[in-house]
Amino acid sequence: MNQKKIQLSDNQLKKTSNFMDWGKPHIYSKDFSVFYGSNEAIKQVHIKIPEKKVTAIIGPSGCGKSTFLRAINRMNDLIMGCYIKGKIFFDDEEIYGQYADPVLLRKRVGMVFQKPNPFPKSIFDNVAYGPKLHTSKRKSELYETVKRSLNRAALWDEVKERLNNNALSLSGGQQQRLCIARALAVDPEILLMDEPTSALDPRATGLIEDLIGELRGNYTIIIVTHNMQQAARVSDYTAFFYEGVLIEFAPTSELFTTPKEKKTEEYITGRFG
């Protein structure tokens, strides 16, 4: 079904900009757009994402959620024909600035993908991979880093006796927690999660959601999800995207109970999507 394109006025853009004082912003974008060739997938997004909070990004398929998430650690650089306009900042540093280093950026901004993607290596080597790449830690230090990261990912007790086993022998939920441990092992400041539970069963989903709750306050977490109930359960703030436009951004409790925009209300009440 063809849907009318959304055109927001400057006043409407300001309403979605999150210029309220919700704490120190960790990610801040201004007039930020992402293009795939001539297709503008993200349209002049203004947003301030608070530090050490959980922010959910919701919206129907194809609305730009994952594109915006990948832009934060420049994963879109790997897509031919993809380019950006406007600016996006990590603290006070411009992510796409002339002197920005994508490798160092990805160390500070970890990412967990929709499907678990452990390396075909041992459990230990999966978690130790990043620290080996970025540091010169001794083996004893690596062991402590692996143990700490697996503990943070609520996986240590389940795998501590089989660290040399192939990671592919783990269940899907365990593999996803291993991927979270791998991301945490390089001590990132931000953790991006792109539909991290969509391929998991309800029990594994619950464990991941519990883990997000435990990590809250220590990391800035940004999670893309199709599941509005999940967004309501795990996030402090929610951003609603539609056709590449940020329609509304607010504390989660407010957005789900008293949305300011009609399109937000239509989406969360199931009228489309």
Image (cartoon, helix red, strand yellow):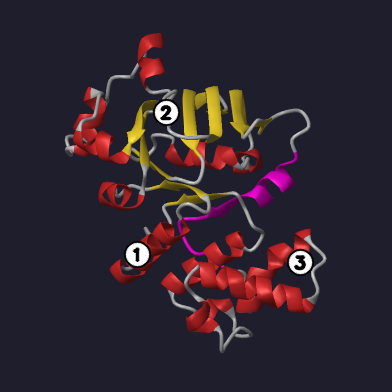
For disc 1, the marked residue is 205
User: At 41% across and 25% down in the image, what residue appears?
Assistant: 20
Residue 9: in sight, yes or no? no
**Side of 7 where 3 appears, left or right:** left
Q: Residue at 66% across / 70% down in the picture?
A: 145
* Badge 3 or badge 1: first in the primary sequence: 3
- Relative height, residue 252 to residue 93 (above, below): below
- Magenta span: 101-118
Is residue 30 part of the magenta span, yes or no?
Answer: no
Answer above or below: position of 106 versus 41: below
Q: Is mark 2 on a helix, strand or loop?
A: loop
Kind of residue sitting beneath label 1 = Thr
Q: In which quarter of the image is residue 37?
A: top right
* Residue type beneath disc 2: Gly
The one nearer the camera, 84 or 20, is: 20
How much space separates mark 2 and mark 3, taking CA atoms?
38 Å
Identified by mark 3, the residue type is: Lys
Q: Which label's residue is closer to the chain start, 1 or 2?
A: 1
Q: Residue 203 in the image: state x and y as whole percent.
A: 31, 71
**Residue 233 vertical position relative to residue 76 in the rendered view, above or below:** below
